[in-house]
Image (tube, rainbow, N blue to C red):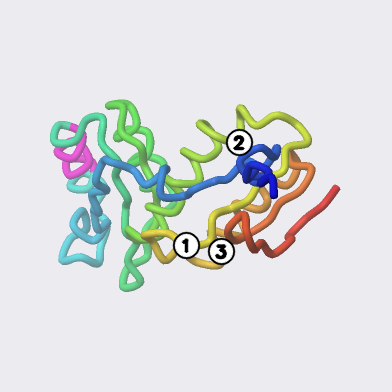
Amino acid sequence: MIMEPIINRVANSKLITLDLDEFIPSESITAIPIAEGLYEGLILKEKDFRNWVNQLVSKYQDQVLTIIDTKDAIVPKWAYLLLSTALSSKGNTIYFSDKEKALERLILDKVNSQFASSLAERSMVIIKGCGKLDLSGEFYGELAKLLRPKCKSLMFGEPCSTVPIYKA
């Protein structure tokens, strides 16, 4: 009886596996509560707020920052423009959310720049199901929006058992 060699059809297929663990950032995310720049955590005094922003600019360079909003104060829209403009001028990456959402946004940005942008049109992509992080449903919805236009098919799980998500 002649044995035929075992062929790994998954390895030889045109499937591209997206392992989200490969996009977990090495850099830490620093959370900055906007309330720290407010008088008694509640009132925005423009001069004091601008001084606080200048202190942040001198403290942070080339870092990932997330500004955490406050529900206790009414912060004018220009304050967010000022924060973003000042902090990004020092090479910082800025998000406006809690740390978990900032991490998800950072991963999506990395997937977009390092994976999706180089994805050959009509690729068959499997989003690996198991990973180190428990990412939100919102994250996966955003990931699907990012990848769907560039894929022939999109699946979730492991190559041996996937859940079909999209097929052109």
Q: What secondary structure predominates along the stretch shown in magenta?
A: helix
**Residues drawn in magenta:** 50-57
Q: Secondary structure at mark 2?
A: helix
Whole-percent x and y of residue 29?
A: 27, 48
Amino acid under disc 3 = Glu
Q: Nearer the viewer, mark 1 or mark 3?
A: 1
Question: What residue is drawn where x is 54% and y is 55%?
Answer: 128
Q: Earlier in the sequence, mark 3 or mark 2?
A: 2
- Residue 98 placement: quadrant: bottom left
Residue for badge 3? 138
Using residue 26 as the reference point, say whether residue 75 is left or right of it.
right
Whole-percent x and y of residue 130?
A: 47, 62
Q: Secondary structure at mark 1?
A: loop
Furthest residue toward front: 1
Q: From what the image shows, is residue 68 above or below residue 1? A: below
Question: What residue is drawn where x is 25% and y is 54%?
Answer: 31
Amino acid under disc 2 = Ala
Question: What residue is drawn where x is 64% and y is 46%?
Answer: 10
Nearer to the camera, 119 or 110: 119
Q: Is residue 55 magenta?
A: yes
Q: Nearer the viewer, mark 2 or mark 1?
A: 1
Residue for badge 1? 130
Q: Residues within 10 Å of mark 3 (few under 14, many from 20)?
A: few
Query: Can residue 146 be seen?
Result: no
Q: Secondary structure at mark 3?
A: helix
- Residue 161 placement: quadrant: bottom right
Q: From what the image shows, is residue 18 above or below residue 155? A: above
Q: Nearer the viewer, mark 3 or mark 2?
A: 2
Q: Which mark is residue 116?
A: 2
Furthest residue toward right: 168
